[in-house]
Every structure is written in structure tokens, then in C-alpha cells.
Amino acid sequence: MNQTPRFRSMVALGDSFTEGMCDELLPDGHYRGWADRVADRLAADTDGSDGFRYANLAVRGKLIGQISDEQVDTAVALRGELVTLAGGLNDVMRPGCDIEHVERTLGALAQRLAAEARQVVMFYSVDPSRRMRGSARIMPQILRLQRFVGDLAKRHDNIALVDLFHVPAFDDPRMWAEDRLHFSAEGHRRVAEAVLQALGYPASFDWREPLPPAAPVPRATKLRADLRWLRLHVWPWLLRRLTGKSSGDGRPAKRPSLERYPS
């Protein structure tokens, strides 16, 4: 029987997904997120006087080129035993996405990290087709990127793949925050469990299991929620696109160095 792997350090790269939006807020004002939840479990299993160390370099809104330019050198220098890499979806969601550039950049990142780290974790993003109106436009790029990531995992023995795409439970609105773009606390909890199981940890629960049926929502309540969503989330997003701004502009990583965790 294989032993559960133990890691003494973890470095997370990416965008808002890995930063942790919109999980519960921590006392320092940062979101918790699935990566922090994974670090909690790994830290609890770490022996030795040095303890467990964790860095999270992810920043919301980052494109794959920015992840490459701003995060990968730091990640390699930190020499984390476990490295998680998620990126490219922000590129895919933008009109005129250069999918070949995304693949080329993501592939170079994965190859460099896999050469340095003991274990790398990558992802199939969730399937938006049943949840987001207008997602048909980006589905060909999402499926192409999924095939590319799958090929990367096949070529590298130390890349573990977490498949969120083929899990219908993520269609449930309760898995998502009010902005309908980022996971809720329950969504982050399930992603963390998916990562831990991909690493060989015994299951704490079935992260693929659907939530119990929800109570019906009155039509008027749904309409008010849609209007609020448009006002608070869609229009600001469109304004940033029109002005060339990003929600992550000027924002530092929440854990830029490999420090003892929990501190």
C-alpha cells in the first residue's frame, strides 16, 4: 500500500482562482482559498523542527504572460517541493485570445516547474457551458486548452491533474460567489479536497457529490439578484476591459515568500 506523500513546502502560482477569491476573509484581509486549505492539511502532516512552509504568488486578473513574467522566476527560486499552477482562463475569456500563445507560455511554465519541483499540480477548469450564458464562444478554446494540459500531464510523471471539468456538482450556483465567476467557500473546500486526493491523500469526503436540493427561489428574487450582479460585477468588469485595467493592477501577492505556515 502506497504511503501518503509528505511535503515540507508548497508554492502556488496563478490568478484569482489560486489567490482564493471569494472564499472567507482572513483576519489580515486576504481571502482564504483552496490553496490555503491544502496548505493547512499539509502543514498538519509535516514533521520536523522546520515545520511546513508556504508561498502563494497568485494575483487576481493575471494573464498567462503575466504569470510567466512575474511569478515563475520567484517560484523556481523558492524551490518548493509542491508547486501548483493554474492559468490561461483569463486569456481565454477575452475576445481575440491567442490560444497558441497561451499554450506555448503555459507549456514552458509547466516544463520549467516540473524540472525543479518534486510535484506539480495542474487543473482542468470547470465546465461553464451549463452555468454561464454566452459561454459557447469560449468553449472551443477551453476544450483545446484542456487537451493541452492533459498532454502535459502525460509527458511529465510529476504533474498531477485535477479534473474539475467533468464534475456536474460545480454547476450548482451555491458553489459560486455572488459574482458568479469565483468559487464560494464550499467551492474552494471541494477544490482543496480534489487537490489532496490527486496527491494521494485519503478522502475526507466525496468532493464530487452534489449538494442537497435547494429550495426554490422566487422569480422576483432571482431578478433582483440578476440586476445586482449586473450593477456590482458585470459593468465594473466591462469598464476595466474598455480601459485596459485589471483587478490585480498594483496588487502584491498575499504570501510572496516561502514562510512557515501557519505563522
Image: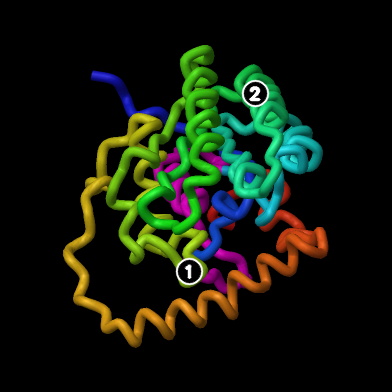
- Tell me the residue at 55%/31% (across/down): 145
Q: Quadrant of residue 45?
A: top left
Q: Is residue 212 left or right of residue 45?
A: left
* Viewer-proximal residue among 5 and 125: 125
If the image is split into quadrants, where does the N terminus sit?
top left
Q: Which type of secondary structure does the marked residue at label 2 adopt?
A: helix
Within the magenta stretch, is there residue 1?
no
- Tell me the residue at 49%/50% (across/down): 135
Instruction: Determine which residue is flagged by label 1.
Output: 24
Residue 56, visible in the rendered structure: no
* Viewer-proximal residue among 261 and 163: 163
Instruction: Determine which residue is flagged by label 2.
Output: 107
Q: Quadrant of residue 49?
A: top right
Residue 67, visible in the rendered structure: yes
At label 1, the amino acid type is Glu
At label 2, the amino acid type is Gly
Q: Give the crowd class for mark 2: few <14, some 14-19, many >=20 residues within 10 Å.
A: some
Q: Give the crowd class for mark 1: few <14, some 14-19, many >=20 residues within 10 Å.
A: some
* Viewer-proximal residue among 81 and 162: 162
Q: Position of residue 75 (x, y in %)?
A: 70, 35
Q: Is residue 132 left or right of residue 63?
A: left
Give, as a single range, the part of the protein colored magenta. 23-52
- Tell me the residue at 39%/41% (across/down): 164
Q: Position of residue 90 (x, y in %)?
A: 63, 48
Q: Which type of secondary structure does the marked residue at label 1 adopt?
A: loop
